[in-house]
Amino acid sequence: MRWTEIAQAIGSIVSGVVGLVGFMVVTYQLIQLKIAVRSETHARLYDQAQQVIGILVSRPELRPYFYDNKSIGPDNELHGIVMTYAEMTADYLEHIAVQKKTLPPEVWEKWVPYIRDRYKSSEVLRNYFSVHSAEYSDELCDALEPPGKTRFRLSESDQASLSPTPEQGS
């Protein structure tokens, strides 16, 4: 065997080892990136939760509309703020739902009951979704209702009762 053949064999082995080490490093980096993305996702969800819940801390009179199934009519002086908070809550729930793919399955399984509980505990939120469900992702609608079930809808008269009155503007 000539020295050139030996050098080529050593070069092939070294090249293979370097390639394997490089692959292991890239795999490790991808695992770390996945962990960082999941961690950041969770942090953002909790940050948004603090903002949404903070409103209830500063406006405790809104809480029954979102935790105790209290209804509200369009003539109620709180109607505008309650409907705005319903939209904020819906947006927050959607933010959770669209993160399904970035959350570990065992974590996502904990969020689904939370989403459904918020929905079931608020007539205002259910009515809001009945009117505005087309504006929200399938991921959220699937989290609220099992796939294949018809999306929630209100009758036209119920929708009209949720629309702003002329005094409230649009």
Image (tube, rainbow, N blue to C red):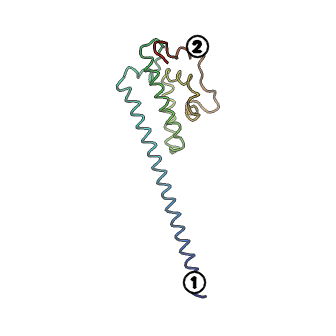
Residue behind mark 2? 157
Q: Secondary structure at mark 2?
A: helix
Q: Nearer the viewer, residue 76 or 64?
A: 76
Residues marked 1 and 2 touching at CB (< 8 Å): no
Q: Secondary structure at mark 1?
A: helix
Whole-percent x, y for residue 128 in the image:
52, 23
Q: The residue under label 1 is which amino acid type?
A: Ile
Q: Tell me: residue 85, above or below residue 111.
A: above
Residue behind mark 1? 6
Q: Quadrant of residue 149?
A: top right
Q: Earlier in the sequence, mark 1 or mark 2?
A: 1
Residue located at (46% from left, 18% from top): 70
Residue located at (39% from left, 30% from top): 53
Q: Marks 1/2: CA distance?
A: 87 Å
Q: Tell me: residue 133, above or below residue 46.
A: above
Q: The residue under label 2 is which amino acid type?
A: Ser
* Quadrant placement of the N terminus: bottom right
Q: Quadrant of residue 52?
A: top left
Residue located at (60% from left, 22% from top): 153
Whole-percent x, y for residue 95 in the image:
49, 36
Q: Nearer the viewer, residue 159 or 57?
A: 159
Q: Residues within 10 Å of mark 1 (few under 14, many from 20)?
A: few
Residue located at (53% from left, 43% from top): 105
Whole-percent x, y for residue 23 in the image:
53, 63
Which mark, residue 70? none
Q: Residues within 10 Å of mark 2 (few under 14, many from 20)?
A: few
From the viewer's perspective, tell me whether residue 51 is left or right of residue 163.
left
Q: How many marks?
A: 2
